[in-house]
Amino acid sequence: MQVILIGRGTEPVPGQVVFNSRGVSAQHAKAVIDPAKNTIVLEDLGSTNGTFVNGFRIKRKSISHNDIILLADQRLNLQQIFDAARTTRENPNDYSVEFAKLQGVWDNYQLLLKQARSNNGMDSFMTVCLIVAPALLLGPIAGVVVGTAAGLGGGAMLGSSIGMAARELFTKNKSSKTQNLVTEIENDFKIHYVCPKCSRSLYGFPYEYYKKQKRCVQCSAIWIKS
């Protein structure tokens, strides 16, 4: 494990994240990096103005690249923590800690895609239950209102037409919404699934593929230590 101190200062300090802000306490917080568990835990050290994650004041919390982190009025991101951690390493080209976080990025991406597509299937089922079926039942009633015994048959046809039209319209809308959601997930994934040193896109191949490579072919950053 590696501990990165975070606080107020005017000059860079190896192994620390420094903010030149009066709102940040001298020893405001610390980040504990655990490569074995692939986690980063942020802990407030009794600061005056607090440490916030996604709008909530915290004492101790595991953080990820998606979190919005504030120390008083100062924004903190994982890259600042990684940069501070690297200043204490024997090899400055060692990006193994940062690369390990991409496992979570990849796994989260796969999970979000699965949920997006699964929800679309459930929505289609609910369409049949909530729109198509009632339309089929109300069709004959509409025929009675129109008037004749023949209208009953016409009402059934009307109900069937309404149900088919509603299902087609709803399915098209859900398909479009699902595609938009998938596009958003893809775009966010592409932003974060990059080499931690040179930002080369790793999109297109799973984490395990790059893990076997051990180094970035573009910048030679060390991803996996031998």
Image (spheres, grey):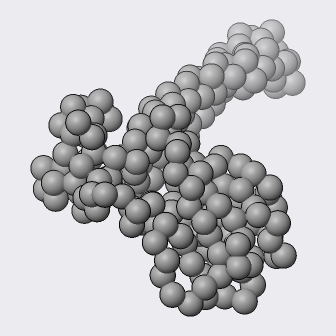
Q: In the rendered image of this protein, does residue 177 appear above or below residue 9?
A: above
Residue 226 drawn at (x, y percent): 23, 36
Front residue of this view, candidates 157 and 188: 188
Which residue is located at x 75 percent, y 61 percent?
44
Which residue is located at x 84 percent, y 76 percent?
48
Residue 139 drawn at (x, y percent): 76, 19
Which residue is located at x 71 percent, y 49 percent?
61
Front residue of this view, candidates 7 and 160: 7
Q: In the rendered image of this protein, does residue 64 appear above or below residue 13?
A: above
Quadrant of res 223: top left
- Report if residue 212 is visible in the image: yes
How many numbered discs, if any?
0
Q: In the rendered image of this protein, does residue 77 appear above or below residue 23?
A: above
Residue 121 drawn at (x, y percent): 56, 23
The reply, left or right, for residue 191 in relation to residue 143 is left
Q: Residue furthest left?
A: 217
Q: In the rendered image of this protein, does residue 69 appear above or below residue 185?
A: below
Quadrant of res 155: top right
Front residue of this view, candidates 144 and 131: 131
- Report if residue 139 is visible in the image: no
The reply, left or right, for residue 53 in relation to residue 100 is right
Residue 20 drawn at (x, y percent): 61, 88
Which residue is located at x 75 percent, y 84 percent?
23
